[in-house]
Image (tube, rainbow, N blue to C red):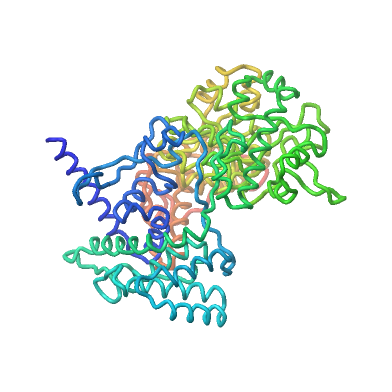
Amino acid sequence: MSAAESVEEEITQLRSLALAGAGALRTGRQWEAWLHRAERFADLGFVNTMLTWAQCPEAIVLHDYAEWKRLGRQVNRGERGIRLIKPARGQRVGHEHVTTVFDLMQTSGEPQPVRLERKKYGGKPQPESWRALASLALRGVPGADRAEWVDWFVRTHAGVGEMAAALELVRRMSAALVAEGTVGSESRLTGKVEAESVAFLCVLRLGLDTDGFAFPYVASWAGTDDRSRPGEIVAAVGERILVAARQAFACIDTNVATPVRVLLGPRLASRDRPPEQAAAASATDAQVVRVLEEAGSFFVECRPESWVSEYLAERGFSEDIQRQWCIGYAPADWTTLTDHLRGLGYGDPAIEASGLAKRSSRGTLIDVFRDRAVFPVRSMDGTVTGFIGRAAPGAASDAPKYLNCRETELYRKGQVLLGLWEGREALAAGARAVIVEGPLDANAVTSATGGRYVGVAPCGTALTADHIALLGKAVDLDSAGLLVAFDADPAGQKAALRAYELLHDRVEQPMIVEFPDGQDPAGLLCSHGTDALTQALDASQRPLVDVVIDATIAKYGHWLEFDEGKFNALHAAAPHIARLPTGQVAGQVARVADQLGLTHAEVTGAVTDAAAASVLQTSNQAGLPRRTPSIRAGPDTAGLEVAALAGRRPGTSQRASPRRRSPGRAR
């Protein structure tokens, strides 16, 4: 096959992928999801928006390798490019080739401006929104009668609510684009969808509330008969929408400043930011981000002359590691950081909004962190969103060991994981994630294991579903697996139980690491070195469900000498076993039978009953008719399925209650 034929074949495959995606758009919500992506990548055209969605659903900014290099960023090793179809420059219309682009999240290096998610203003358009709408009304519609538009605009703005007026203006403009032939349509219904979609995109661009939009099922306007090729109809409609939207965007973008967030490189000071980026930035968010950036630089500058450097070095964290993780020091005085930020020209509102200062009882601003080692917390795009401070050795007993900055618009403890950004490249290369308790533990796991493990830590809060979802975006949890390494104290065990509830549906077999002598990762690194920590992570794993089942049985510890206590413990533990993958059931049955001194058949019966009860409960909650659940038998449950579904133990003619003896008669 020649090179040209190979290119044509790939283009055909990519078009098929895009059309398949178009055909999969069925509901109005799915169409709205495409529109959200189209607003960001309208210049790419419909086919490429679908290809981007298919290959990188969370894409932010796309450039090819050369452009990223020109912008001072490097594509991370091992990243897979996004293949798009692009017309070749300087050649006849219709001649296409395949190009490879990379998303911002696949690169590292110099900071870049990134459009933030559009904010909603509570139904009230901002002055710049009205300027853009007036411009659209007067100049954005080819052939429109300006006098009529001006008259209608003034009357509408004065006569109805601001949000209603804004939406009506956008809808009239969109309908005019359709009527003027800028976008054509196959049918009247298709034309309505096109006009409403263009209006939706403009509202998104303006940052207004989109709750007033609702789209019909795609099949209602694209058809369902495969012979009419509904995918191609969807693609044609989508392309016309984007053509119109680009015209509208050209008008909107000249009136509405595009808000940006700057991606922060570990060593980049805010004073190095290009002035044009600062000028375009959203005032509030940009000031807060810059305050956080300046604070991080200040903390790092203070570290060498503090106790932090020596303390961390003694615990096994070299100077290189301290610099790599941008660990700093917050001076002990009450207002050192606040005074520094004021000296750089930042006002008290921005300093307080950053979460790094708070109001004293006298109403003055004081620093949140004083005499603490400070660890920056970054979002997945590298932006510093907050900090965690560790108390000095020998600090007062009533001082918290770890302290978070106050929660802000940028910093939500339940939605960020310390160490995830620092370990992103290792995770992409196949490292295994380890959920730990604190910043030093996360640092120890990542820096001491040579890329085999990456430590991530919740920021002073319990593990949340958002944490797991965030981790799932960085690594395939099903294939890579996951380790939990909490402390051996009661709080650590509670955290492990919480982790299991969040993980058992996401990871086939989450594992827990139990370190020798009850140590944590940072403690093991300090006392025994990197090899001991790596060996412990390799060799001290066991299923996290073991901990859950053992903790459940332990609640009945005072009664386990009696049969009734044993069976109560069994029935409490059985639901945990019942929801395990089939291949893990037999091992847990044997383990629980040994712990309680029961037979495998007794434990298996309880597990089977728990599984049947769970399926029946699920069907009842869903409003489904009752029917006998089908329970898959595991390796040690062959022959038990029919008996269990009949509601009785194997070998009995009717349902048998567990053998119980009165207290005092040990079995």
Q: Nearer the viewer, residue 632 or 110?
A: 110
Q: Is residue 374 left or right of residue 137?
A: right
- Tell me what residue is drawn at x 52 percent, y 62 percent: 207
**Residue furthest front in the image:** 147
Please indicate, yes or no, whether residue 665 appears anywhere in the rendered image.
no
Which residue lies at the image location 30% right of the left edge and 60% below the top edge? 239
For the N terminus, the quadrant is top left
Quadrant of res 242? bottom left
Identify whether 70 is placed above or below 218. Answer: above
Query: Residue at the spot x=67%, y=29% of the render?
Result: 300
Q: Is residue 314 left or right of residue 266?
A: right
The quadrant in which the C terminus is found is: top right
Whole-percent x and y of residue 322? 63, 25
Residue 467's place in the image compared with 108, above or below, is: below
Nearest to the observer: residue 276 or residue 314: 276
> Residue 545 location, x and y as percent?
52, 39
Q: Quadrant of residue 338?
A: top right
Residue 344 place in picture, x, y as percent = 71, 40
Is 4 on the left or on the right of 606, as rendered? Answer: left
- Residue 190 x %, y %: 29, 72
**Can you say whether 442 is above or below 335 in the image?**
above
